[in-house]
Image (cartoon, rainbow, N blue to C red):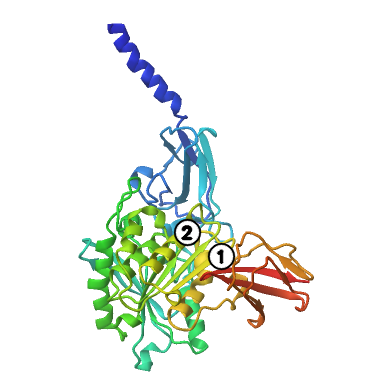
Amino acid sequence: MKSGKILLPVLLALFAAASLHAQVTFVVTNLPANTPAGDYLYIAGNFTGWNPGAAEYRMQKNEQQQWSITLPAQAEGTVYQYKITRGSWETVEKGAGGEEIANRNFVFGNGSTQEVSILRWADDGGGASSTAAANVSVMDENFYMPQLNRSRTIRIFLPPGYETSGLNYPVFYMHDGQNLFDVLTAYAGEWEVDETLNRLASSGHQVPIVVGIDNGGAHRIAEYTPWRNPDYGGGDGEAYVSFLVETLKPYIDQHYRTLPDRNNTAIGGSSLGGLISCYAALQYQQVFSKAAVFSPSYWYSDSVWAFAHNHPKTAEMKIYQLCGTLEGAGTVEDMMRMSDTLTASGFGETDLHNKIVAGGQHNEALWRSNFEDAFLWLFGGGAQSAGSMEDKPVVLFFPNPVKEKLSFAGLELIAGDTLSLISADGRLVKQVQNFTTNEVDVSDLKTGIYLFVLKSRNVLFEGKFIRE
C-alpha cells in the first residue's frame, strides 16, 4: 500500500509533465543601431496582459550579449502572441519603414528557441519626430482621476481658429489618446484625427474639440471593461466612465469654450475602447448623444447584452458601429447582435449606422480610414463613402479588373438594398435601388478605379474595383 501511495503521485507528475511542452527562450538577434544603450527590452503579449513594461518580463543579456528571456512550459499548441518593447507602447518595435507590424506568434511544440529580429522602434530610439498638428497639445500629463486614485495624460485638439473665433464648440471624448494624433506616441500607428479634422475644417465643416484620454497601460483592460472576465479580469469601467462624466467633462467645460449640452457631446474608441464607448453612451444618455463604436470587443462579457437590453433609448442618440470582416470569429456577428438589441430597445434605423468593411482588420489602419465617415455621420454631415480612396480597405471582386459585368459573392441581398458606384473623384456615377442580384453591369463606366457601396439592412458594405 505504501509503495502504491508513492507511485500514484509520481504517475500524476509524469502525466502532467507529458501534457506540457518544453519551456521557450526568446532571443533578440538583431537591434536597430539607434537603440539607446541604457534601455532594457521587455516582452509583452497575451500572456502578460499586454503590459509593455512588466518587471517580470524584462529581458536579460545572455553570454553572447543578446537580449533573451526564458518562459515556463505550456501545453502543446498554446499560442503566445507578443511584441518587443523598451518599456512602453511608445517604444514598441515597428517595421523597417516605421509601419505597424502584426503581433508575433509562438506555438508551444514548435521548438524551444524563438529568434527575434527588430528592425525599428516606434520612437526611432528617441529620435523620431512628432506628427501632431500645431493645434494639438498635452493638456495635462498627470490629470488626477479620483474615482480610480491614479493620474492620466490628457491630450486636446482645438479646432482651427479657436483662439480668435470666440465660438463655443462640440466636444468629442476619445479613448487611447496616445494613438489619436501623433505617430511618436502611438502604439501601432496613429488615427490622424488632427489631420482629418483640420482638412474638414478647411473645407467648411464645423469640427469639435477632441479630448484624448491616454489609456493606462496595465490598467487599460480594467478601465475599459464594466464587467469582469474570468480570464482577463477587469471591471473598473464604471469608475472610469464616472471619471469622464463627473471630473473630466466639468473641467473641460470650465476651461474651454464648449457646447456642454448632450446634443454636442460625443464619445468614441476602438476595441475595448469601443465597448466602453457603447457602455458610456447607454449608461449616461443625459450626457452623451453620439458614440463611435469601432471594432467593439463585445466578446469580453455576456453581461453586455443584458445591459443594452436594460438601458433602452431615452433621448435622441446616434451610434456608429464599425468592424472589418477579418477581425476574428464572431466580430461581425456580435456587432450586428448589438444592433438588433439596440433596435429592440427603442433605437430606430436613423439612430444606428453599422458599417462592415470587407477585408478590414483589427488595427489603426481600419479606424483611421473610417474616422472621417464616422465623424460626418455623428455630427450631422452625413456618412460619406467617397473621399480618400487610397485609405479604403480592399474587397476582391471577380473579375477585377472588369470589362462589362462585375460579380461578387457572400452577400445575401434583399428587396430594398441600394447599390452605389462612386468614381475616384467622389462623383456618384451609378445607383441601383432594390438591388437584389450578385452582378452589376459596368460596361457604361469609363476606365478607372471605382468605389462599390452596398447598403443592406442598415449595414454598409464597401470595396474597390477597376474598370478596364
* Dots 2, 1 in contact, CB < 8 A: no
How packed is label 1: few (under 14 Cα within 10 Å), some, or many (20 or more)? many
On the question of residue 214 being in view, the answer is: no
Q: Residue at x 38, y 16 (%)?
A: 11
The kind of residue on which mark 2 rests is Gly
Q: Nearer the viewer, residue 153 or 3?
A: 3
Q: Which is closer to the viewer, label 2 or label 1?
A: 1
Q: Quadrant of the C terminus?
A: bottom right
Expressed as whole percent of the image width and height from the top left, the position of residue 207 reads: 43, 83
Looking at the rendered structure, the secondary structure element under dot 2 is: helix
Expressed as whole percent of the image width and height from the top left, the position of residue 341 reads: 39, 63
Expressed as whole percent of the image width and height from the top left, the position of residue 140 reads: 30, 72
Q: Quadrant of the N terminus?
A: top left
Looking at the rendered structure, the secondary structure element under dot 1 is: strand
Q: Which residue is mark 2?
A: 125
Expressed as whole percent of the image width and height from the top left, the position of residue 83 reads: 47, 50
Q: Nearer the viewer, residue 387 or 216?
A: 387
Say above or below: 28 vs 436: above
Q: Residue at x 43, y 64 (%)?
A: 340
Report the Cα–Cα distance between label 2 and label 1: 35 Å
Q: Quadrant of residue 187?
A: bottom left
Name the N-terminal-most of marks 2 and 1.
2
Q: Which residue is mark 1?
A: 357
Say above or below: 197 vs 37: below
Q: Quadrant of residue 304?
A: bottom left
The kind of residue on which mark 1 rests is Val
